[in-house]
Image: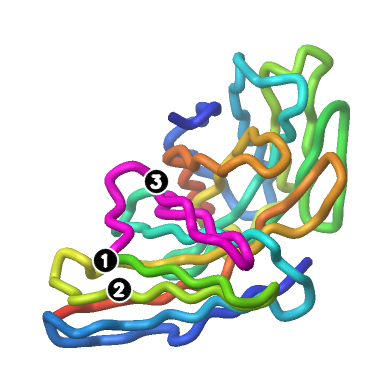
Amino acid sequence: GAVVSQHPSRVICKSGTSVKIECRSLDFQATTMFWYRQFPKKSLMLMATSNEGSKATYEQGVEKDKFLINHASLTLSTLTVTSAHPEDSSFYICSGLAGGGSTDTQYFGPGTRLTVL
Amino acid sequence: LAKTTQPISMDSYEGQEVNITCSHNNIATNDYITWYQQFPSQGPRFIIQGYKTKVTNEVASLFIPADRKSSTLSLPRVSLSDTAVYYCLAHNYGQNFVFGPGTRLSVLP
């Protein structure tokens, strides 16, 4: 299957700082990428849909000014958590949409563990 | 809301075949069924995808009956390393994936 990487795999930061997470599709071009967050023992929750060259679409309740998404190329999307607070601590996972025609498959990155102190 | 419902948890023993059923009574004509496996602190891993009848790959089989109101993921001869959460999704092309709680499979020795 297609491969998606994330960097960093884990990050610890102080409250009030900003953190950038990179998501790369390594062997396919992803016009669309998705960002999820996951709390312990819970399911994935979609935060936003990122389309190359256009503004991201955020899910209801997700602050777009706090979670900045940039999708500058067909293989890279970034999520920046601005002015992070302890409640932003979570597991962030991205995915790239691969395929075409009448079907598609999302391939997920390994995730980034964010801890805000 | 997720379009699918699955058992919250299942137990099995090593070497057994495991069948996880997913209900999707309101599946749309253009929806596909995709299953993912997730280990703790890892991103979901694609297992298999299908539209109807039977699909098989090197790790699993997916059975979707003609009415498409349910589907069954079949894992042959599970091992301890198959202990994970399994998610079933029904989705249309380009549509957002909505994850339900998944099925927590525990494989016992």
Whether residue B109 is visible here, answered yes or no, is no
Comes first in the chain, label 2 or label 3:
3
User: For the residue marked with disc 3, what is the amino acid?
Assistant: Glu
- Quarter holding the C terminus of chain A is bottom left
The numbered mark at residue A66 is 1
Circle 1 SS class: loop
Q: Looking at the image, is B8 positioned above or below residue B56? A: above
Return the residue nearer the eye: A83 or A13.
A83
* Range shown magenta: A46-65
Q: CA distance from mark 2 to mark 1?
A: 6 Å
Comes first in the chain, label 3 or label 1:
3
**Number of numbered callouts drawn:** 3
Indicate the position of residue B30 as horizontal and vertical percent values.
76, 27
Q: Chain of mark 2?
A: A
> Who's the residue at 78% across and 38% down the image?
B62
Q: Are marks 2 and 3 on the same chain?
A: yes
Q: CA distance from mark 3 to mark 1?
A: 13 Å
Residue on which disc 3 sits: A59
